[in-house]
Amino acid sequence: MILPETRVLRLGRASLLWRPRALAVCLALLLLCLVLALLLLGTGTVRLSPAQVVEGLAGTSGETTVTRVLRGIRLPRVLTAALVGASLGMAGAVFQSLSRNALGSPDVIGFTTGAATGAIVQIVLFNAGTFQVASAAVVSGLATAVVVLALARRRGTEGGYRLILVGIGVGAVLTGVNNMLMVMGNLDRAMSAQIWLAGSLNARSWSHVWPALAGLALFAPLLALNARRLAVLELGEGMAAQLGLNIARTRVLLVIAAVGLTAVATASAGPIAFIALAGPQIARRLTRAPGVPLLSGAWTGAALLLAADLISQRAPLGLLLPIGSMTGLCGGLYLVWLLGQGGAGAGKR
């Protein structure tokens, strides 16, 4: 049965279901991201008008100082923020769907902390570069996911509160490991790791953009291809098995893709809270559509991180807050509101 708000686009033997409201919301979020990006590109020590930003990016006046600043400093920062926000928003939608719980985001259930552990090892012990940090974050994030899922499946149960509680426990252990690693390193490397742990978009370069872009380009299509299977899993394992879904293989693919997005995002900007938690839920409320808000969650995550970066740079009294601190503050307030509304129960998002 096709819902009244659903449209069908037929392309030969293939068909595509789409919803006008969801499409309108995605287009509005895209426009919002472009506006925020334009404002961010004009924000800095030297304020630029939107017209100057467009002219500087186009390079119509030749290779000027404004063009070099925009292309070499501000544009990589904005692109990193957008890609990291989109990755976290999409990953959060997957984890909340798999756990059928509003708290099922990678920063709550320990996957972000696990990715941070590998990155801290590279920073503190080996003083590694961007590529090594990103690679270690991906590997340690996947290893954390394996541990959490294995413990959550103990005695034949998984998902819901068990997955959340196991993830919180593993995340707490890894937080202690991360603190111990920083004590082991010398002062300079420990300070670098501490700054990285705060989550920051400062000094982002094209070497941070490319890993984030590669991660999104690699894992997002895998999630899109399995979006219908993910929606079936939301019905429960019993119903999914009756519909002929290979639950184990589907779950593994989805977790690998979502953890990959989380790990690459963490490697590019450090641990960023709130985005994966709130992005999918805000997108679901905006679209009012059934199913998993992968695309809308990605656009919402990008808009949230861009907005947080804009607020942190234009905060009063000249306070230049790390982006992780800003999103953590907003995330804490959102979590308190969510718990007050009773929205953290299983199956409520």
Image: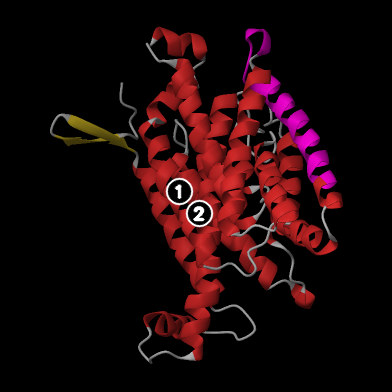
Instruction: Locate residue 97: give its quadrant.
Output: top right
Give percent across and percent down for residue 246: 42, 15
Give percent across and percent down for residue 330: 71, 52
Whether residue 19 sits left or right of residue 117 in the image: it is: left
Quadrant (top left/top right/bottom left/bottom right) for the C terminus: top right
Neighbours of disc 1 within 10 Å: few (<14), some (14-19), many (20+)? many
Q: Is there a contact, CB below 8 Å, between mark 2 and mark 1?
A: yes
Whether residue 325 sits left or right of residue 76 in the image: it is: right
Toward the viewer: 63 or 349? 63
* Residue at x 82%, y 54% (from the top left corner): 185
Toward the viewer: 299 or 198? 198
Query: Above or below — where is 340 with respect to 218?
Result: above
Please, what is the three-letter code of the amino acid marked with disc 1? Answer: Leu
Magenta residues span 154-180
Give percent across and percent down for residue 135: 56, 47
* Residue at x 74%, y 35% (from the top left corner): 171
**Secondary structure found at label 2:** helix
* Residue at x 65%, y 37% (from the top left corner): 111
Residue that mark 2 sits on: 212
| Residue 279 seen in this snapshot | no
Residue 340 on the magenta segment: no
Residue that mark 1 sits on: 216
Instruction: Locate residue 95: give its quadrant.
Output: top right
Query: Above or below — where is 130 with respect to 311?
Result: above
